[in-house]
Image (cartoon, rainbow, N blue to C red):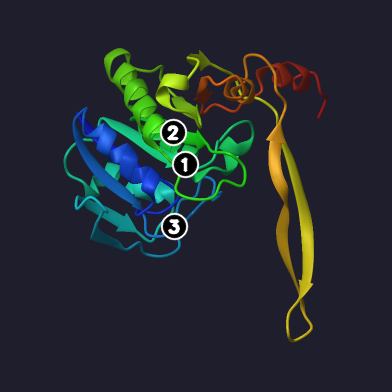
């Protein structure tokens, strides 16, 4: 079993190290991640410039590859042949914040796993629902253990074609988890605000700021599961077609 581990927070992120260490219990691990933070980058593929790849060393002394490309590039490059040995599974994370609801379209963590599925390789994205405003070093041990348990099931039982596993883990000790729930995407509530400023030359510039997003607590959703202390496992599909809308649109006269 050859597992590619990546993320969107950069190759030296502690969540990636915790994930790689757990995945090594399941097989050979290759770490291939961005050389900088690409959070909220979405599904990016670099086409207009060359990509650079360098070797580096993680905090535990293990070898890794890093690229100046996006998270999706860090999956595409090895799957296209930069890594000669066949890759059987891609696991992306561990993101320090939850990726729920519409977050999945912004998330480099989730879209890296999507890149794997597009290439016909199983993909899992793992995120930690850390407390808002948390100070200090996050404990990724529970999320890493959950990621290993989910990966074990995917290796043993497989996944339907075109499905990405989006896993979100409460910030709890493993013994405190209330269980696992297969969920649907919930409703994320964004509270973005435009911050307009002026530079020293009198020209305006802009920040997209505002308060941290919240969500609607509803049974059966990713946000609802996390609120109950449950690990949320959401199967995402790459086919974004709204099939009910197709039936309506077919009645239009053009």
The residue tagged 1 is: 95
Label 1 or label 2, whichever lies nearer to me, is: 1
Residue plotted at (49% across, 35% down): 128
Residue 47 is labelled as 3
Q: x, y percentage for residue 114?
A: 45, 35
Q: x, y percentage for residue 167?
A: 47, 27
The number of numbered badges drawn on the structure is 3
Q: Counting residues from the N terminus, which is met first, the one under dot 2 or under dot 3? A: 3
Report whether 28 appears left or right of 139: left
Which element type, helix, strand or loop, lies under badge 3?
Answer: loop
Which element type, helix, strand or loop, lies under badge 2?
Answer: strand
Q: x, y percentage for residue 48?
A: 45, 62
Q: Is residue 112 visible?
A: no
Residue plotted at (58% across, 24% down): 226
Q: Which quarter of the rendering shows the N terminus?
A: top left
* Real-space CA distance between mark 3 and mark 1, rounded to the nearest whole angstrom: 26 Å
Q: Quadrant of residue 129?
A: top right
Q: Residues within 10 Å of mark 2 (few under 14, many from 20)?
A: many
* Real-space CA distance between mark 2 and mark 3, rounded to the nearest whole angstrom: 24 Å
Q: Counting residues from the N terminus, which is met first, the one under dot 3 or under dot 1? A: 3
Residue plotted at (23% across, 50% down): 60
Which residue is more in the foreground, 20 or 230? 230
CB under 8 Å between discs 1 and 2: yes
Query: Quick one: which residue is furthest to the bottom in this view?
Result: 201
Q: Residues within 10 Å of mark 3 (few under 14, many from 20)?
A: few
Give the answer, above or below, for where 217 lies relative to 98.
above
The residue tagged 2 is: 125
Report whether 246 appears left or right of 130: right
Which element type, helix, strand or loop, lies under badge 1?
Answer: strand
Q: Which quarter of the rendering shows the C terminus?
A: top right
Q: Is residue 110 visible?
A: yes
Q: x, y percentage for residue 161?
A: 41, 20
């Amino acid at each position: 079993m050859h597992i590619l581990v990546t993320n969107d927070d950069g190759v030296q992120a502690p969540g990636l190290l915790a994930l790689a260490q757990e995945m090594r219990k399941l097989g050979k691990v290759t770490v291939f991640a961005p050389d900088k933070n690409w959070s909220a980058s979405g599904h990016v593929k670099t086409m207009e410039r060359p990509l650079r790849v360098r070797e580096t060393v993680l905090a535990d002394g293990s070898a890794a590859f890093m690229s100046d490309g996006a998270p999706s590039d860090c999956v595409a490059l090895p799957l296209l042949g930069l890594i000669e040995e066949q890759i059987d599974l891609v696991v992306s994370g561990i993101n320090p914040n939850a990726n729920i609801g519409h977050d999945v379209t912004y998330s480099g963590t989730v879209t890296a796993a999507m890149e794997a599925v597009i290439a016909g390789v199983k993909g899992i994205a793992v995120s930690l629902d850390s407390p808002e405003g948390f100070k200090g070093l996050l404990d990724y041990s529970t999320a890493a253990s959950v990621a290993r348990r989910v990966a074990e099931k995917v290796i043993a039982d497989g996944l339907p074609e075109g499905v990405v596993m989006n896993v979100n883990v409460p910030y709890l000790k493993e013994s405190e988890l209330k269980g696992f729930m297969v969920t649907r995407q919930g409703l994320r509530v964004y509270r973005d605000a435009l911050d307009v400023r002026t530079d020293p030359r009198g020209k305006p510039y802009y920040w997209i700021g505002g308060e941290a997003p919240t969500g609607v607590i509803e049974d059966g959703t990713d946000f609802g599961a996390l609120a109950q202390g449950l690990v949320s496992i959401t199967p995402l599909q790459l086919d974004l077609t709204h099939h009910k809308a197709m039936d309506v649109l077919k009645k239009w006269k053009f």
